[in-house]
Image: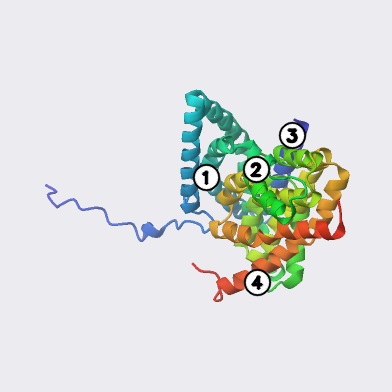
Amino acid sequence: MSAALLIDILLWGSVAGVGFIAWRRGRSVLVSSLREGSLEFAGIMPRIAIGVVGSGYIAAVIPQEIITGWLGPDSGWLGVLTAVIAGAATPGGPVVGFSIGAVALKAGGGPPQVIAYVVAWALFAFQRVILWEIPFMPARFVWFRAAVSVPFPFLAAAIAMAIGKP
Amino acid sequence: MSDAPLKDPPPAGGAAEAEPPPGRVRKPIGWSMISILALVLVSAGLVWRRDGAEGVVEILSHDLSLFGGILPRVLAGCLLGAFIAEILPHEKVSRSLGPKSGLKGLLIGTAFGAILPGGPFTAYPVAAALLTVGADFGATIAMVVSWTLIGYGRAVAWELPIMGTEFTLWRIVISLPLPVLAGALGRFVYARVYPNGAPE
């Protein structure tokens, strides 16, 4: 709980900090950004509602074995590919993603495949995209960002294979 | 007496255009949200068939409490984004993070994403604010990818304890070049998809 409290303090502290700077620039700057921010909040709420309330259902119908079964040892580039898909399809927050990665490592999954999994999860995890990225960012940016990110889990796995680490 | 037909009062001096919607506020529901909604409804139907009504209600109540919990953070994120969009000097941002900012712009975006505190509720509103004040897709992609891949918050809080130090450090070392590469690729593709600048 203390981590969540720390995040909230940091977050509202930053809001207060930039709000103070805006206020120093003049009352109208403060008022117009408050208005802009509230309008943004009102516009985003329905999207967040659909994302939060809905993604629980999507997560509930994805079978766990699809994700864990795909990270087998000696799976080579096919294993990397499946790891990337599994990373994108992993529901839940960082605990779930990293725990699956840790289980895969302990169960003998190849480190490059697990690297690809973690990187793909960071780049594409569908719940984060649905919940946060699509509501806040212009849709065109999100699809663009996701499309140009596709090569990078593979690149990360290739680097891991080349340097033989971790 | 006054049998003059009561017409609609004339609009008071062009008041129809009094409040143009600000550029940042988008339509609340677009095609992306409609497809997500469809996916959600199908999944909810599958849960209902598998677990019955209790299963549906259980997930709904859990997610509703989650929704209530994150709303204040979403508000904070929106305010943060609005303040940053307001106080950042536009011409400076477009010089250091715009389409012509070169490698330096990608590096600034990467550094910014790596040190940004908070979670997704800060990263995405701030990224959207950068876009509106003149950062290009490339620098913004570098920032978002850097936040997800080398941002210290998640690595320290979750990855180190769960995955172990060796894996985490190597994973981050391997990820270091990726935000700049992703931003460069984004810029390269953007210039070819939209040769005449952004549509709209």
SS for callout 2: loop
Mark 3 residue type: Leu
**Residue A41 versus residue A165: which sits nearer the camera?**
A165
Q: Are marks 1 and 4 on the same chain?
A: no
Mark 4 residue type: Phe
Mark 2 residue type: Thr
Q: Chain of mark 4?
A: B
Label 4 or label 3, whichever lies nearer to me, is 4
Query: Residue tagged by mark 1?
Result: A47
Q: Residue furthest top?
A: B54
Mark 1 residue type: Arg
Mark 1–mark 2 Cα distance, whole angstroms, equals 21 Å
Label 4 or label 2, whichever lies nearer to me, is 2
Mark 4–mark 2 Cα distance, whole angstroms, equals 30 Å
Query: Residue tagged by mark 4?
Result: B188
Residue B160 shows up from this direction = yes
Q: Chain of mark 2?
A: A
Q: Are marks 4 and 3 on the same chain?
A: no
